[in-house]
Image (tube, grey):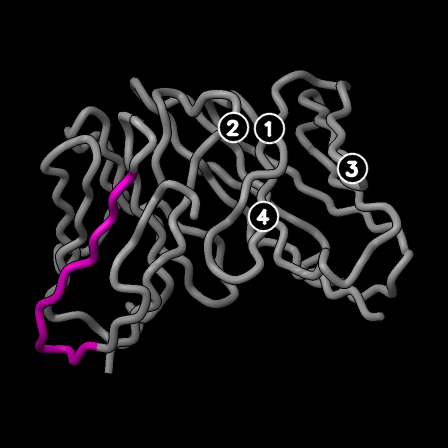
């Protein structure tokens, strides 16, 4: 059974802290690993990772994939209260002409002032 | 606005009602998806449509019936639901294998079954 597991499930930090969110996966027909941020309703895209060992960065956020050990991490430096959200990790699997995303449970991040 | 629009935003229905959720995408994508997000659980894939043809049905009960009349529109018809079906229902679209930016999600319909 395809499975994506995130840890921790929840995290409370103070502004300025650095956080690391973890995502491990056991899936078939793996193509890529995606990270989303969900604040209220629609998950919004952060990163898509396909190549192992290559870090992707966007401002204070960065992510890297290890497709041998089957995990990814999302780092957020100098956290701000606006970073408070649920962070979703998903494995994208090939399936016919499309594909499908298998999600983890999410990590709920709360950043206190 | 993500380019994927879902209506209604909120829906309360009785167990004997029939209602429909609507999703419309303006991105020119050729695949559309329904996901269910329940509290404390991962997003669950329900249905996948590619080029208006259903290509995946993840053991979803028959009280949920999808319809994809064209590549821009996706419906989820609901009838005789149970209280445990209360959840956020998210629609997403993608171009083929997802492109460089994966899926685009709508804002969801918050469904409450009473």
Q: Closest to the observer: B57 or A75?
A: A75
* Picture residue at 25% right of the left edge, 44% below the top: B24
In the rendered image, residue B23, in percent from the top left (x then y), is placed at 25, 48
Residue B24 sits inside the magenta stretch: yes
Frontmost of labels 1 and 2 is: 2
Residue at the outermost bottom position: B114
Q: Does the CB distance between marks 1 and 2 fall below 8 Å? A: yes
* Picture residue at 30% right of the left edge, 35% below the top: B26
In the rendered image, residue B74, in percent from the top left (x then y), is placed at 19, 43
Frontmost of labels 4 and 3 is: 3
Query: Residue A59 has which mark?
Result: 3
> Mark 4 highlights which residue?
A88
**In terms of sequence position, does the residue under pointer 1 or pointer 3 come before the other?**
1
Tag 1 secondary structure: strand
Q: Determine if marks 2 and 3 fall on one subunit.
A: no
Chain where mark 1 sits = A
User: Magenta stretch?
Assistant: B13-25
Query: Residue B101 has which mark?
Result: 2
Other-residue count near label 2 (Cα within 10 Å), few / some / many at <14 / 14–19 / ≥20: some
Quarter of the image for residue B84 reads: bottom left
Q: Does the CB distance between marks 4 and 1 fall below 8 Å? A: no
């Amino acid at each position: 059974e395809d499975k994506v597991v995130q840890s921790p499930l929840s995290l409370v930090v103070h502004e300025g802290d650095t956080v690391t969110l973890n995502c491990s996966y056991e899936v078939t027909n793996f193509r890529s690993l995606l990270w989303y941020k969900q604040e209220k309703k629609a998950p919004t895209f952060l990163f898509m990772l396909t190549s192992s060992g290559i870090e992707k960065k966007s401002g204070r956020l960065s992510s890297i994939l290890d497709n041998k050990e089957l995990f990814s991490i999302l780092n957020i430096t100098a956290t701000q209260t606006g970073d408070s959200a649920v962070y979703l990790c998903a494995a994208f699997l090939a399936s016919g002409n499309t594909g499908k995303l298998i999600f983890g449970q999410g990590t709920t991040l709360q950043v206190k002032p | 606005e993500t380019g994927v629009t879902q209506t209604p935003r909120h829906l309360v229905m009785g167990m004997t009602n029939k209602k429909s959720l609507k999703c419309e995408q303006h991105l020119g994508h050729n695949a559309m998806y329904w996901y269910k997000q329940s509290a404390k659980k991962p997003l669950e894939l329900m249905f996948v449509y590619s080029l208006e043809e259903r290509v995946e049905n993840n053991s979803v009960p028959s009280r949920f019936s999808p319809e994809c009349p064209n590549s821009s529109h996706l419906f989820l018809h609901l009838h005789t639901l149970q209280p445990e079906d209360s959840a956020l229902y998210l629609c997403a679209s993608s171009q083929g294998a997802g492109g460089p930016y994966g899926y685009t999600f709508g804002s969801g319909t918050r469904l409450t079954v009473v």
